[in-house]
Image (tube, grey):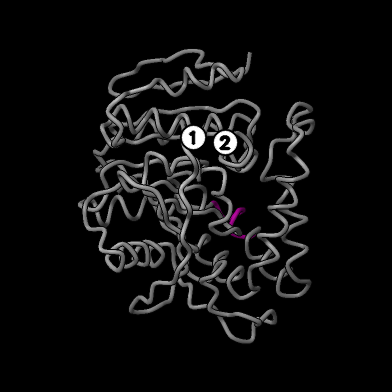
């Protein structure tokens, strides 16, 4: 097995923000956009992809090393984060600063998936293919907006631990098998660490941006690039039905449902997630390696198989199941 490429951390000074970004590998570029309320380190299990791909993994505005409220946990100084569209603009400005101007694959999970949708619809010439993970096309309902507002108020009053306590159980699958995962405690600790690394102003601003984001159903009907949709079978935040709806909207979409995974598929099932990404990119010619190995077959050796492909019009649905 080839050794892992060293990932380099640096900052890019953009017109309106300074972003931290980790990058490494060679081949076709893959932009990874993290979930709320996390940062780039949620993608560490994807570093193995650097033997085939050039990974670009930023901390989005206000998060992680891109914190514009460093040391400010009171909320007295607001974050500069204003909207999901703004985060998409940041991503394009980052690619320009890194002199990556060719179309690339954009992968976003949850909040990062909302950002990826804006990239695909507002900057279609920059997107070669799209990977949406644990995300949805519709806007928040009034009930969800009220919940986000309540959570923002609690975080301002009580701090980040209330956020970690509220979110971690919902971010991960709750089945007996998932709870018995030998890496479960490590994953929970990693999530808690990432949440506590953020600033209160950023969390509040991000919750407001998530609440205010527009419905993207009509806009996403115009997307024509190959699109991979990945859902956790046990996702309590964004159930597979949300991705099934996206598959009915996006013209050239394929859905993969990952067994025993919740909202954090890349953390909970990294082998299957990475295999699905590589299989998708190989199929659509974005992988630089000429030998097209069946990556889902590799994962089958690790007790995971692709159970069936259901074809409907131009869309495929692959449901992955444990044996």
Q: Is residue 104 left or right of residue 164?
A: left
Q: CA distance from mark 1 to mark 2?
A: 6 Å
Q: Which residue is mark 2?
A: 270
Give the x, y percent position of residue 180: 79, 30
The answer to whether residue 158 is above or below residue 128 is: below
Q: Are marks 1 and 2 in contact (CB under 8 Å)?
A: yes
Which structural element holds mark 2? Answer: helix
When asked about the image quadrant of residue 214, the answer is bottom left
Residue 142 within the magenta-colored segment of the rendering: yes
| Residue span colored magenta | 141-146
Disc 2 crowd rating (10 Å Cα; few below 14, some 14-19, many 20+) is some
Q: Residue at x 34, y 18 (%)?
A: 312
Give the x, y percent position of residue 237: 62, 43
Q: Residue at x 61, y 76 (%)?
A: 201
Q: Is residue 61 left or right of residue 105?
A: right
Q: Is residue 111 left or right of residue 172?
A: left
Give the x, y percent position of residue 277: 42, 34
Q: Which residue is mark 1?
A: 274
């Amino acid at each position: 097995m080839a050794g892992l490429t060293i990932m380099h951390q640096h900052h890019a000074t953009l017109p309106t923000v300074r972003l931290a970004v980790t990058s490494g590998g060679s081949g076709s570029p893959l932009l990874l956009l993290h979930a709320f309320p996390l940062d780039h380190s949620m993608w560490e299990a994807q570093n193995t992809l650097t033997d085939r791909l050039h990974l670009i993994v930023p901390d989005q505005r206000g998060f992680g090393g891109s914190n514009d409220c460093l040391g400010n946990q009171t909320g007295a100084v607001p974050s500069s984060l204003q909207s999901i569209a703004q985060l998409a603009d940041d991503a394009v400005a980052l690619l320009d600063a890194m002199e990556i101007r060719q179309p690339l694959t954009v992968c976003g999970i949850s909040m990062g998936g909302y950002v990826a949708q804006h990239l695909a619809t507002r900057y279609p010439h920059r997107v070669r293919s799209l990977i949406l993970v644990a995300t949805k096309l519709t806007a928040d309902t009034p009930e969800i907006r009220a919940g986000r507002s309540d959570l923002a108020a609690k975080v301002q009053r009580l701090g980040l631990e209330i956020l970690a306590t509220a979110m971690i159980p919902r971010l991960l699958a709750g089945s007996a098998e998932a709870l018995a995962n030998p890496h479960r405690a490590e994953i929970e600790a990693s999530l808690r660490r990432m949440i506590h690394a953020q600033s209160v102003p950023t969390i509040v601003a991000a919750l407001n941006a998530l609440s205010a984001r527009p419905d993207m159903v009509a806009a996403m009907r115009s997307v024509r690039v190959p699109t991979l949709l990945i859902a956790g079978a046990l996702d309590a935040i964004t159930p597979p039905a949300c991705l099934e709806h996206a598959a009915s909207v996006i013209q050239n979409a394929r859905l993969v449902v990952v067994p025993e995974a919740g909202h954090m598929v890349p953390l909970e099932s990294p082998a299957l997630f990475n295999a699905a990404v590589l299989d998708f990119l190989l199929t659509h010619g974005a992988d630089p390696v000429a030998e097209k190995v069946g990556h889902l077959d590799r994962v089958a050796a690790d007790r995971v198989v692709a159970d069936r492909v259901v074809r409907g019009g131009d869309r495929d649905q692959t449901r992955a199941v444990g044996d």
